[in-house]
Structures are given as C-alpha cells and as structure tokens.
C-alpha cells in the first residue's frame, strides 16, 4: 500500500470514532502527557488501534490520539511520538502528523525536551523555536514525491510561523514567562552528544539540541500547515556543565516545568487554531 493510502485509511478510521474536525494539532513531548487530560469532551484512541500507527515503546510516552476541544477550539493531540532512534522508519515517525494534516488541521504545535547550548539557556527554560537545523542524517521527504501531500521541493525559509512565535511570546509574558527564541538542532540519537560535538553544534548556530521535531516540522510544512515549536530545556548540553547527562535529569526537569508549560499550551493552542 502506498503511504498516501495508509494515511487516508487512518483518517477514515479516526473519523469513524469521532466527527470532530480539528483545526489545530499538537505533539506532546517528554513529560507533557498530562496535558491530554485538559482536552474537553475528549475521545482518546490508542495508537495501536489506528491503522498503520506503530506501537510506542519508550516509557513516559503514552501513545494516544486525543480529539476534543481546548477552550472551545477543536484540536487533535498526539500524546506521545515516534522517535527515529527507536528504530522506526522515518515514514512511521512522521505518519501521525501527516494523518492530522489530512484530518484537516491548519496548524501544528510541536513540543519537545532539549539540551541547552546557547549561553543564556538554563535547565527549566522554555525556548520558542525560531528555526531548525536538520542533522538527523536524513530527510523524511526523500523518495518519490506524492503531490497529494505536497510539492517535490518545499520551501523551508520560514518553517516556524513568525506570527505564531509572537503569539507564544505574548501568551508566555501573560503568565510571567519570558522564553527566548532559538534554533533547534536535531540529531538522530539516542546517545547524548560529546562536548566536542556540542562545541561544533554551537559553531553551527544551534541554541538547543534534541532528537525529534524536525522530521515532523518538515512534513507539516510540506503539507502547507503553519507550524510552531516550543522546547523545554531540560539540561545543559554536554560539556557546558561538567555533570554527566542522564535521562533522569531530563525527565525530572520536564516534570518540574510541566505546570507552566501546560498553562502556556492551554492559552496558545486555541489561538493557533483560530
Ligand atoms: N541532547 C539531545 N537530546 C536531548 C537532550 C540533550 O542534551 N536533552 C533532552 N533531549
């Protein structure tokens, strides 16, 4: 079966479970799963039930599509994502976002946990993604292009919608947060970086480093969706602090920040869906 037919089979299945026409899509990163509980009139569908969705492996990523509304705006929330480092094919990583695109969302908010490289970023800070650098080693659009999804050579000169960046900044200021804007750089992982690699990434212009988001953003733009991204800086990148990195530090920081992050999402998502 072609990718497009798989996407449409998933869309049809989802429509059979809920008549909701979501305007905005959200991908919840590490530690944000709880946000799905804020969706009103929610219909939750485990990924395992949706045709052609892969099973989710990593702890802390629940793996459900939650359809409902946030402050009255119909939304589709992906509670858990597929990571390339888990061994998934890149087409499986981006599949849920493409399904949401065909389900009719007009905009997509991507969230993640990241290591802070830029001098001023501290663990616990949020960063509005201004742009990205794809160093994952592959592009999700490689291969035959399907014009029903988007053009062969999509423009990437403004992946993260400038107006959405301002919307997030204003919403954050309203709850006493002052997130910086920065460049997110994606590597394939799963090992964290070496200090020498982080010095290289800093020289390349990265402010934060992580292992997700970029393939989803590329595919969303390919489909013509408006994209926004927010990183939770969970740790200083390797060599910036002398301490070794641990997944535990990442999840602990994400947990500490999650109340602010969730509050921000509740304000931002309805605005992105307008
Ligand atoms: N590097 C890569 N990915 C990450 C990090 C990091 O330091 N922190 C959270 N995700």
Image: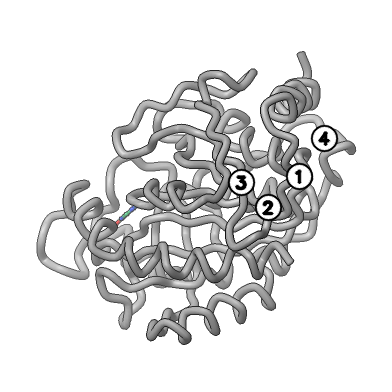
* Residues at marks 1 and 2, CA–CA distance in whole angstroms: 7 Å
Q: Residue furthest front?
A: 41
Q: Say if mark 4 contacts mark 2, CB within 8 Å.
A: no
Mark 4, residue position:
145
* Residues at marks 4 and 1, CA–CA distance in whole angstroms: 27 Å
Q: State which quadrant residue 195 falls in.
A: bottom left
Between disc 1 and disc 3, whose residue precedes?
Answer: 1
Q: Is residue 209 above or below residue 164?
A: above
Which disc number belongs to residue 68?
Answer: 3
Tally the marks: 4
Quadrant of the image where one finds ligand 1: bottom left
* Residues at marks 3 and 2, CA–CA distance in whole angstroms: 6 Å
Between disc 4 and disc 1, whose residue precedes?
Answer: 1
Q: Residue furthest top?
A: 1
Q: State which quadrant residue 72 falls in.
A: bottom right
Q: Say if mark 4 contacts mark 1, CB within 8 Å.
A: no
Residue drawn at point x = 59 percent, y = 63 percent: 71
Q: Secondary structure at mark 3?
A: strand
Regarding residue 201, the answer to whether it shows in the image is: no
Check disc 1: other Cα within 10 Å, few if <14, some if 14-19, many if 20+: some
Q: Say if mark 1 contacts mark 2, CB within 8 Å.
A: yes
Between disc 1 and disc 2, whose residue precedes?
Answer: 1
* Quadrant of the rendering where the N terminus is positioned: top right
Mark 2, residue position:
74
Q: Secondary structure at mark 2?
A: strand
Mark 1, residue position:
21
């Amino acid at each position: 079966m072609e990718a497009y037919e798989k996407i449409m089979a998933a869309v049809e299945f989802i429509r059979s479970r809920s008549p909701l026409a979501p305007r905005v899509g959200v991908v919840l990163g590490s530690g944000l799963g709880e946000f799905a509980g804020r969706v009103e009139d929610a219909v939750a569908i485990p990924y395992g039930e949706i045709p052609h969705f892969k099973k989710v492996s990593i702890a802390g990523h629940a793996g459900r599509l939650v359809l409902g509304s946030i402050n009255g705006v119909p939304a589709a929330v992906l509670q858990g994502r597929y990571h390339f480092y888990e061994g998934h094919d890149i087409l499986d990583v981006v599949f849920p976002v493409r399904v949401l695109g065909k389900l009719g969302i007009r905009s997509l908010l991507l969230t993640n946990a990241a290591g802070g490289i830029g001098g001023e970023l501290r663990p616990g800070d949020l960063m509005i993604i201004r742009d990205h650098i794809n160093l994952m080693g592959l592009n999700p659009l490689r291969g035959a292009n399907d014009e029903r999804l988007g053009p062969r050579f999509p423009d990437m000169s403004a992946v993260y919608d400038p107006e959405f960046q301002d919307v997030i900044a204003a919403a954050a200021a309203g709850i006493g947060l002052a997130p910086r804007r920065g460049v997110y750089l994606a590597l394939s992982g799963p090992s964290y970086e070496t200090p020498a690699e982080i010095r290289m990434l800093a020289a390349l212009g990265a402010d934060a480093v992580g292992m997700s988001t970029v393939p989803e953003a590329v595919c969303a733009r390919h489909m013509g969706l408006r994209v926004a991204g927010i990183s939770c800086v969970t740790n200083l990148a390797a060599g910036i602090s002398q301490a070794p990195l641990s997944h535990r530090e990442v999840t602990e920081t994400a947990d500490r920040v999650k109340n602010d992050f969730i509050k921000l999402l509740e304000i931002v998502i309805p605005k992105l869906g307008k």
